[in-house]
Amino acid sequence: MRRLMPLWIVILVLIVAVIYLPGASKYLRLKRREVELSREIERLKIQIAELKKEEHLLKTDLARLEEVVREELGLIKPGEIVVKVVEEEIPEAAVKETNPT
């Protein structure tokens, strides 16, 4: 009888482990996912607040509206001249010839 008692305890522990461990691992995965989603929600709330602030500025501040329209749509006022500066890409061989190190 005394020899069977430790065997039953081991068997009982194994049964509990088989039943409990899959649920515990799933719980931990879900907890991690919850934390990730909470962070994403906070990031999105901040982004929404920034967008609402920008919306308010665009509705009330004509200088900001003009700045955005010029930047996004490339519009200009009558009589203005647009000057675009295009930087020339220098090949590596030319750079090595001018700077021998």
Image (tube, grey):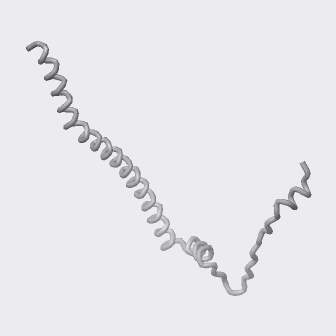
Vertical placement of residue 28 versus 15, above or below = below
Left-right relation of 68 to 96 = left
* Quarter holding residue 40: bottom left
* Quarter holding residue 15: top left
Vertical placement of residue 31 versus 80, above or below = above
Q: Which residue is drawn at 68% across and 87% down?
A: 78
Left-right relation of 11 to 90 = left
Q: How many marks?
A: 0
Whole-percent x, y for residue 36 in the image: 38, 49
The residue lying toward the viewer, choosing from 71 and 100, is 100
Q: Which residue is drawn at 58% across and 76% down?
A: 69
Whole-percent x, y for residue 52 in the image: 44, 65
Left-right relation of 7 to 74 = left
Whole-percent x, y for residue 31 in the image: 31, 44
The residue lying toward the viewer, choosing from 47 and 92, is 92
Q: Residue at x 18, y 32 (%)?
A: 16
The residue lying toward the viewer, choosing from 39 and 97, is 97
Q: Which residue is drawn at 86% across and 58% down?
A: 95
Pick out the residue farthest to the left. 1
Left-right relation of 61 to 80 = left
Whole-percent x, y for residue 83 in the image: 76, 77
* Quarter holding residue 29: top left
For the N terminus, give its image quadrant.
Answer: top left
Pick out the residue farthest to the bottom. 78
